[in-house]
Amino acid sequence: MKSDKGHNELIAFNKLFSDYQGRFIRFASTYIDDEMAAEDIVMEAMMYCWENRMRLDFEGSLPSYLFTAIKNKCLNYIRDTNYRQAASEELQEHLEWKRSLQIATLEACNPEELLTKEMHEIVNRALAKLPEMTRRIFMMRRFEEKSYREIAAELDISVKGVEYHMGKATTLLKKSLKDFLPALLFLLYY
């Protein structure tokens, strides 16, 4: 007897579905621009009603309840679409801002300046690692443009001692700047 009741309910529900499906979809399509989404909303509402028929109170007619359920699903769909669109627009604005910043930064970028600054930092760090006397001799030669003889006389050491300290400083700087040498050569000769 129970299976007859279930069978009769299914037949009645299928009839309701076939009688109202077109109207339900047209109703949903009025608010949802996507025909497939409108059909999905109608199917979801129908499935929900069928699966929960024992606990739902249809207070009036089932078609009226379904129209209300479809209306609410359409509202949720539109709200979700608006939210996704707003998030997408915000993301798009952020990406446009980021691209503009990248363009402005690249346009203002002077690779020679970047290399020069970075090389100066590396040279300063390398010089800081040198023993005091070696650093002092290197600075006198490269930045004060003194000859080996002038440096030797001023520091009261031999010219060979100046050569030794310059060799030591040059070796350390070559190691520190090894990654920049191709770029430096490019900048110097092109």
Image (cartoon, rainbow, N blue to C red):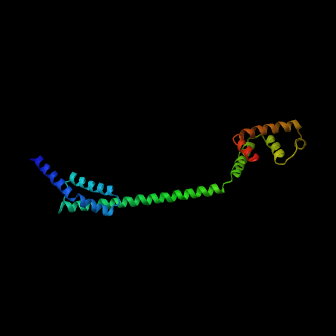
Query: Residue visible at 83% across and 46% down?
Result: 140
Whether 186 is drawn above or below 46: the answer is above
Query: Residue visible at 56% across and 56% down?
Result: 99
Q: Position of residue 134 (x, y in %)?
A: 80, 40
The answer to whether residue 88 is left or right of residue 73 is: right
Q: Position of residue 179 (x, y in %)?
A: 69, 41
The answer to whether residue 154 is left or right of residue 10 is: right
Q: In front here: 153 or 10?
A: 10
Query: Where on the picture, by quarter, is residue 78?
Result: bottom left
Q: Position of residue 142 (x, y in %)?
A: 82, 46
Instruction: Pick out the residue farthest to the left.
Output: 1
Query: Residue visible at 32% across and 55% down?
Result: 36
The answer to whether residue 39 is left or right of residue 163 is: left
Q: In front here: 6 or 39?
A: 39
Query: Where on the picture, by quarter, is residue 104?
Result: bottom right
Whether 169 is drawn above or below 5: the answer is above
Q: Position of residue 9 (x, y in %)?
A: 15, 52
Count of picture labels: 0
Query: Where on the picture, by quarter, is residue 70?
Result: bottom left
Is residue 54 in sight in this rendering? Answer: no
Is residue 121 in sight in this rendering? Answer: yes
